[in-house]
Image (cartoon, coloured by chain):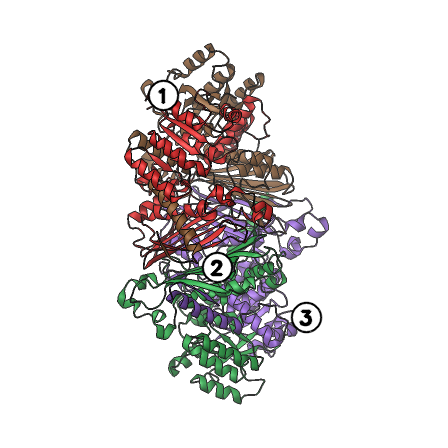
Chain colours: A brown, B red, C purple, D green
Amino acid sequence: MNKIRLGIVGGGGDSLIGVLHRVASQMFDSYEIVGGVFNPNWEENIGFAKEIGLKTDRIYKDFDTLIEEENKKSKDERMQVVSVLTPNFLHYPMAKKLLENNFNVICEKPLTTSYEEAVELQELQKKNNTAFAVTYTYTGYPIVRQMKDMIKNGLIGKVQKVDMQYYQGWINPIIHDKSLRNSVWRLDPKKAGISSCIGDIGTHAYHMLEYITDMKVKEVLADLNHLYDDNELDVDGTILIRFSDHIKGVIRASQIATGEENNFTIAIYGDKGGFRWEQENPNYLYHLTSDKPLQVLKPGNPYLSEFSLQDTKLPAGHPEGIFDSMGNIYNGVARKIRGIKNFDGGFPTLEEGVRGMKFIEKVVESDAKGNIWLKL
Amino acid sequence: MNKIRLGIVGGGGDSLIGVLHRVASQMFDSYEIVGGVFNPNWEENIGFAKEIGLKTDRIYKDFDTLIEEENKKSKDERMQVVSVLTPNFLHYPMAKKLLENNFNVICEKPLTTSYEEAVELQELQKKNNTAFAVTYTYTGYPIVRQMKDMIKNGLIGKVQKVDMQYYQGWINPIIHDKSLRNSVWRLDPKKAGISSCIGDIGTHAYHMLEYITDMKVKEVLADLNHLYDDNELDVDGTILIRFSDHIKGVIRASQIATGEENNFTIAIYGDKGGFRWEQENPNYLYHLTSDKPLQVLKPGNPYLSEFSLQDTKLPAGHPEGIFDSMGNIYNGVARKIRGIKNFDGGFPTLEEGVRGMKFIEKVVESDAKGNIWLKL
Amino acid sequence: MNKIRLGIVGGGGDSLIGVLHRVASQMFDSYEIVGGVFNPNWEENIGFAKEIGLKTDRIYKDFDTLIEEENKKSKDERMQVVSVLTPNFLHYPMAKKLLENNFNVICEKPLTTSYEEAVELQELQKKNNTAFAVTYTYTGYPIVRQMKDMIKNGLIGKVQKVDMQYYQGWINPIIHDKSLRNSVWRLDPKKAGISSCIGDIGTHAYHMLEYITDMKVKEVLADLNHLYDDNELDVDGTILIRFSDHIKGVIRASQIATGEENNFTIAIYGDKGGFRWEQENPNYLYHLTSDKPLQVLKPGNPYLSEFSLQDTKLPAGHPEGIFDSMGNIYNGVARKIRGIKNFDGGFPTLEEGVRGMKFIEKVVESDAKGNIWLKL
Amino acid sequence: MNKIRLGIVGGGGDSLIGVLHRVASQMFDSYEIVGGVFNPNWEENIGFAKEIGLKTDRIYKDFDTLIEEENKKSKDERMQVVSVLTPNFLHYPMAKKLLENNFNVICEKPLTTSYEEAVELQELQKKNNTAFAVTYTYTGYPIVRQMKDMIKNGLIGKVQKVDMQYYQGWINPIIHDKSLRNSVWRLDPKKAGISSCIGDIGTHAYHMLEYITDMKVKEVLADLNHLYDDNELDVDGTILIRFSDHIKGVIRASQIATGEENNFTIAIYGDKGGFRWEQENPNYLYHLTSDKPLQVLKPGNPYLSEFSLQDTKLPAGHPEGIFDSMGNIYNGVARKIRGIKNFDGGFPTLEEGVRGMKFIEKVVESDAKGNIWLKL
């Protein structure tokens, strides 16, 4: 099985979303990054490609050139999928051209800057059969998928109440200073579109709600807060929602919940039980019922569904961050190999391994000799 | 900056440790897997290499061939580092040969099967200047590194008591059945060495203790439990430790703590404060003092040390598992592209992106019109 | 200092609110229960008084008799305060008569069944100087009082967003069965008034909000859910609230949050920080800021305010439930003395005390002899 | 049913243990405090009795007088049970005399200052049939009793490993200062007996272990820490324990775990499952198994045993501290009645009750009118 040829547009330099997509693409040994356009500035574009160790033959000067050059390649060489990580207003024209040229697309959210553009992309996609993913990242957690499965299988019965929260506090240090708040792109309608808070995070909560329940919201009533009269976009909002006359709920989102980091939580209640989940502790799914003790489900356990388990790579009890932990050790080794300044403790050394062996031997000896003290 | 050329020995097929090392190697865009030996069986070896999308020209039939062939290559082509993921008893001969041939080495723990072998490797390494990492994985967590830093900087004063726990329950369903317990390699002294529980996980706890405190254990007194007379290796143990006459502590490890998954915890107390940390919730570091409220430190925040922050790739509040979550979405797209059966919900689709745009528009409209109900 | 003479109206038999008030009245050695009317039925009234060990000379046949007889008593004998624990619709006439006769009053919530009645009571009270408490119980937690104090002292700056949740699930097993839901008094407008969920628990959330912030809600917009057309009262609701144009928030309450027990939570965010608190873990106050680690405050610590500390009776680390734990031991002894069936383990026996002494001696001896095994 | 006549010896003034016993004695309406000796100093003794509102006719000048005078009383008047809350060294002579005179006894732990004395008390008690409780307080928690029951009923199978921890840090600010540590009674062998840490808290852990498992520890091996050469008593210790050759465990206790408040935890593992419990969060019992999700049991739920439920006075979700919360409100009212300085917010006032009624009415009206804004 050949690796899927992946191109990336945007996400160069310090871009956090760039790191996220590159690492994610390696999680299942499925993708090879073959090229892309990381930056409109050529120096930075090519520089970044080199920095992350890519060959430079398919690093293009701009998006149009990428399309043009890739189209010249044979079916076995051409990029199969392109990830669009550019600023929001570029999603639409790029996704459109990629669809028109029959590339599969992975596009960051929000999909576009208006509903109208979004619908146009959808019309286009209907004509071909490309994969098109919008990266609502949080739906990928194994235990979220377990929740979706259990709701579908009736474990909590008919849904009767929903409550989604997405609270952050990052904009608080900015919003109270007039010049600061007028200089942030997220608060500028020209760059961010018609909404700041709801467009950025409320939409995650909304998507997740429909994702896990397989139900469609029918009506909304929203109360947004701009906090200052001269602040054009919302930084906080509460949205009443209705699935039907008797199935109601609420979506709450905020960027002024001072001190909150990324507190995205789900509470879904049905007539047979309920679920709670928190993004900051993504390995714990709480299953509530009327008559039994609270149950706590964790990834990788045999009691989970196939959908949840297919995406779990390690045994139960290993939080997914373990990849990151091991990654940091590899990074320490890389620094050593490259002669870059390394922190003391950057990776466990041979000496530490040797000492570990001594420990095991002395422990077994102490026990065998009747639990006596031994020097190490 | 070219990627570092990484070879891998072992870790093929369903090997969990294989996945862990491959993904970790991609976390910082620093390594390229150029080849290796994944399996002693050639069919499985080459098959696995293809499955994970590697070129097959540097997949070797065995370890000796790898050394021989790589030695023929130029400095710019030769593998720079080799990860040793083979069964424990192979660590020593392979690491030895790699050192003798001046490869950098990343070796799984336990380093060897005896202290004697370990010392021999150490002697060898002194002669060259290769990087040699033993993958005590848990030391890579950003917040563990923060703890190490804060202890070094005196935040908890002079360490006066330590308590390390590593509790698992996985061997419980095996240990009570005579035939089962006689068939598990971890309980077979020929394959596992002189210890099961301490060798596998007690050693992690011990290493972590010295890693974060920068202190050396002077003496041990151990009480191990084999649970059955015919079970040769320990499955549980408590180890009294002394740093000095007045600085004491305990390491506790178990494989029969039924229902525990990977419950590795740290408690370190000094004369000015203390720390608690749990591997299953690796993003939370608890800092205790005598006179102030408990403080909870989380990765990625500006109040952390440089050592901790250098390894954090995403903003505060994004648990490290976010890579895994995004990885699962990429995996869903890969399945779609490859025409493999996909679960409903395997990745967020274009339709979902479109609906998200409608949501944002209606929410802003509801608010603007005075908080009224609007259909979605 | 004589104990305050307390009368109780209602709260007999299995009444939970009765237990709560009786025990609470003993917490500070301040009150003596001198009499009351526990039940409209004389047999049950007098029977209950005997069961809880009261003298029967001031157990009255009805509320009017209580007033009449107590009024005959001298200033040094007369009840000083009366607790009104009767069904909601009786609060108003009883409280009114108590005020008219210059008794201090402790009244369960909701105060009355209509705003009009409530205002009338307020007018009455203005004429005398009696104490009149409405038992919004949750405001008594030491750490809630700490939160109130810290908000007043500007620790989180100017409040900019509030979010109160009170979720229960107890009505779920009732609401889906037509005959059941028509037979519950809480869902009967004649007995419960105009609201079930908001009247019972939403009002707690609302009161707590104004209590801790010292701010007044200016406007509300509510969306309630009755779940079934034939169910007259709300069982769930979300209430948008405004303190001013730019200070907003939400109160969420539910009786159909299946599996929730008494999940009352607070989140208050200001421009300098925030607080989170959960009633089911009432000893933990979470203080969030933009730039420092999360702080967790716990009762009884010297870093707390005088207002919080005055009500803490035990050292830090002793959850308030410790009274209950000790109470159960006293209860076990009472059963033994009274010759009532006792569970094995109902209280720790002398034998257990003896064994404890042996343990201490052997432990010290083992240590003194160089850490050797000793039989117990 | 008359209240049981309770006498109290010790526990006057600021004594925390005094408050604990007095409140506990009122939890089930079973006891009346009829007298006692609160302090060897007569002024303080009688002063304290008045302060807590007791009649003074049975406040005695010393313990011997109490015995003498109470013995003169009739069977229907005489104290039925006496609580011994005096310093440790007085437990033995007082308990002895109480037994000799056929009083029921509730005695604080440790029972005596030596095993020998303890045995003597036991011999004495065998001759009569008095109730004698040693107040190992923590065994009274409803959910601890549930754990005991479930272990007895085989829910976790045969116990195979136990781990008890009791960590405090209170002695840390004292121990490092030579003059301070020489002035604390707990570190003075004459007053505290042969042990500080183990005698005070290790013994709780030990008792709890035998209480919940119904098993007897056979052997101990202890390693204690005095931290300084001139400190005669232990302030920390780890104790290896054995129930049998293959059933082992550990008890860990510390007073130098800086920043810990009262961190008493239990972990018990059997061949079918395990339990975890933490005293600082006493309402949560964690039940682990090999093959099912973690279950979290909470007090007051119908799925619990009769033994656990008999001691639960309030519905599920009301933490036991609710009594304390309500008690603080009663305290606020008492201050008002007595004209003592009250904090603003000391109890919820009538005004607050009135406002609550308005809230309910406006909420229902907003909903009924189609979810519109209404002024409050």
> Which disc number belongs to residue C215?
none
Asked whether, in this view, residue A318 is left or right of residue C116, the answer is: left
Task: Evaluate whether residue B315 shows in this view.
Answer: yes
Q: How far across and how far down the image is residue D122, in percent?
A: 52, 77
Q: Can you say whether C364 is above or below B78 in the image? A: below
For the residues beneath circles 2 and 3, the answer to whether they share a chain is: no
Distance Cα–Cα, label 2 vs label 3: 43 Å
Q: Residue at x 51, y 25 (%)?
A: B42
Residue B223 falls in image quadrant: bottom left
Q: How far across and how far down the image is residue D180, in percent?
A: 29, 67
Between circles 1 and 3, the one closer to the viewer is 1
> Which residue is disc 3 drawn over?
C41
Distance Cα–Cα, label 1 vs label 3: 102 Å
Callout 2 environment at 10 Å: few (<14), some (14 to 19), or many (20+)? many
> Which disc number belongs to residue D279?
2
Q: How far across and how far down the image is residue C33, in percent?
A: 54, 73
For the residues beneath circles 1 and 3, the answer to whether they share a chain is: no
| Residue that extends furthest to the bottom in the rendered view of this protein | D72
Q: Amino acid at mark 2?
A: Gln
> Which disc number belongs to residue B72?
1
Q: Amino acid at mark 3?
A: Asn
Asked whether, in this view, residue C212 is left or right of residue C56, the answer is: left
Q: Secondary structure at mark 1?
A: helix
Task: Evaluate whether residue D81 shows in this view.
Answer: no
Give the chain letter at badge 2.
D
Give the chain letter at badge 1.
B
Give the chain letter at badge 3.
C
Q: How far across and how far down the image is residue B24, in percent?
A: 42, 33
Q: Can you say whether D71 is above or below D92 in the image? A: below
In the rendered image, the quadrant that contains the C terminus of chain B is top right
Distance Cα–Cα, label 1 vs label 2: 65 Å
Between circles 1 and 2, the one closer to the viewer is 1
